[in-house]
Structures are given as structure tokens and as C-alpha cells.
Amino acid sequence: MSTAPSFRIGALAFPSPVVLAPLAGYSDLPFRNLIRDRGGLGLAFSEMIRPGGLLLGREKKKQWILATGPEDQPLGWQIYGKDPPLMADAARWLQDHGARLIDLNMGCPQKKISFRGAGAGLLKTPDLAVEIAERVIKAVTVPVTAKIRLGWDDHTLIGQDLARRLAEAGISALTVHGRTAVQSFGGQADWTAIAAIAATIPGIPVIGNGDISTPETAVMRLATSGCAAIMIGRGAMRNPWLIRDITQAIAGRPPFPKPGKAEILTLTLHHFDRHSELYGPEKGGILFRKWIPLYLRPLLKMERPAMVKLLTIPGPRELRDALASLPV
């Protein structure tokens, strides 16, 4: 039977070239394990972590963002910031607490982050981006990777040059989102540009990211881009079976049956319960509401009035009961 090709980052080997993106506010332990349970995942990343919050933040919030377990492997930890010594300290702290892979966020387009010079803001200060990479790499012994975009805007397409400089600094892999920071998630990802960056650093595995929402697209991008792996973000949020189905297609195996309404509802309830276990019933119920439209609107074709009614149910127990009683 065919198997999906593996890929490596430094000494770490991964069973599939399909990677779950670091998704702020979404890729927590419950969601990562939900994806792992479906199968096909090579590597997942944590939500992006602010070094100050990690080293000095409130213990409860830190506990939530750092939550993991033996079943949540392999896992990379992503940090973001613009202070090289602080980034190095955070990476060292994570390694001391068991991290086997550190990722540097140089691509988040959120204004509250990028307009302060962190995340994709580093695309406007590439010398600082390279200094951060150098300091972090010297601070730890585990592989260090980075995630970038093509540039800040169409007038500053520095992706190839920054990729080369990061490779010279010693990064072990590079993820490239095929848009500029100004584009955010609008327009279309430029996979020609991603392929050009991959060709610029042939000794470094490149993970391509952007607009992969079907197994067919994933197979094509992996075959034509020169990338060692592909990263899935928003597509997995809307369809938790997508990574499983992509890995199946890459391996040349026949597709799984599409999940029916009952299976979708079971997954939704399972995710709800995992949220409650991690965050507590009240906090978990509040945080889970953002997932309800993602799952139920496209997968169960729920109309707006019914969705609004669900989202305005006050208590977590009542919300779960309402979800469990949906007609499937």
C-alpha cells in the first residue's frame, strides 16, 4: 500500500508532509488533538506565543496556551516578537520545558502585532528579522524554523532575499505564505513566488502555505512547487477531515467517504467537551462559540436564524444540549 512521503526538519522526521498551521486563538490543544484523531497529520504548531506572556504572564493563561500531552506530538512551538534577547530567552525557556522545535513568526498580518514591528512587521526590518533568528539559534540546540510572507507589500517583495539570509543564519526549515502582509488573506496565494523561494534555498525544506482547501490542490502544489511539505490553516478549521484526506490523496490511496451530518455533529460535541476539559465549563463554552459557525454553517448548511439562536444560548450546559439535539 502506498504511503505519503515523509519529510525532515533537522534530525526530526515526520510521517506526512502535511502540517497544521499555528492559528492564533484556534490551534490550541483541543483542536490539535481533534485533527490528530482524524489522522494524516505530520506536524502541528502551537498558537503563537508572546515571549513576555510566556516568561512573565498570568499562570492560568500560560497554562492554557502551553497545554499539551504525549498524544500531542510532534509539535512545534511558535513565538513572536521584535526583541532579539527576549525571543532568545523565550526559546530557551521552551526548550528547557520540553520543546523539540521552535518556530519564529515573521508573517502574522494582524495589525495589533505587525504594526508594532513584530510578526509580518519584521518584513519591513529584515536586518532585525535575521538578528532574531541568529540569537534564537544560538540560544537553543533544537531546530529553529521561521514563517514568512512574500514581503510587506507589492513594493517590498523581499521573500527570496530574506529566505537566503535566514538560511545562512542557520534556520532548519522555512514556511512561506504566498501573500504579502498587506494582502492579509485576500486575493490568491502566489505559488509561483513560493516555488522561487524554495529554489533559492535548496538545502532547506520549505513548507508552502496558502489557499489549499482540497486534496487535489494539495497534491498539485506539493508536486510542482519544490516544497517539502504543505501547511493547512483555515481549510482545516472549516473541515477537520481535510488533512486526513490530503494525506490520503498524496499517498495515492482512494478517498474516504465524506462525513455525514451525524459524524459532523459528533465531532462538534467532542470538540466542545475538550474545550470544557481544558478551560472549564464556563470559559470553554464561551470560547467554543467561535467554532459553531465554522462547523455547522458549511457542513450542516445551517441557516442564519438557527445559527443566531444557537449562539445566543447563555449557559454552556444549555448550549451543549441544543447542539446535541440538532436534527441530523
Image (cartoon, helix red, strand yellow):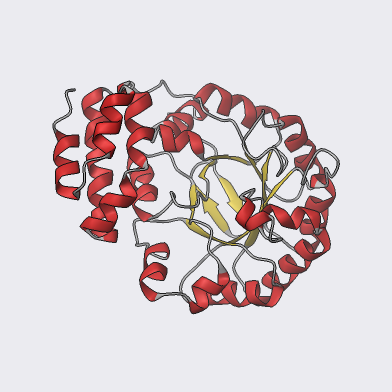
In this rendering, position of residue 296 left or right of residue 232: left
Percent across and percent down for residue 85 are 68, 77
User: Does residue 267 show up?
Assistant: no
In this rendering, position of residue 252 left or right of residue 308: right
Q: Nearer the viewer, residue 14 or 61?
A: 61
Percent across and percent down for residue 300 are 30, 23
Q: Quadrant of the C terminus?
A: top left
In this rendering, position of residue 275 left or right of residue 255: left
Q: Quadrant of the N terminus?
A: top left
Q: Nearer the viewer, residue 310 or 147?
A: 310
Q: Quadrant of residue 189?
A: top right
Q: Nearer the viewer, residue 275 or 100?
A: 275
Q: Nearer the viewer, residue 133 or 273?
A: 273
User: Does residue 13 show up?
Assistant: yes
Q: Is residue 95 above or below residue 158?
A: below
Q: Is residue 249 above or below residue 145?
A: above
Q: Residue at x 67, y 58 (%)?
A: 172
Percent across and percent down for residue 264 are 27, 30
Total residue callouts: 0
Q: Is residue 57 above or below residue 207?
A: below
Q: Residue at x 40, y 32 (%)?
A: 239
Q: Residue at x 42, y 33 (%)?
A: 238
Q: Quadrant of residue 178?
A: top right
Q: Residue at x 25, y 46 (%)?
A: 272
Percent across and percent down for residue 309 are 24, 32
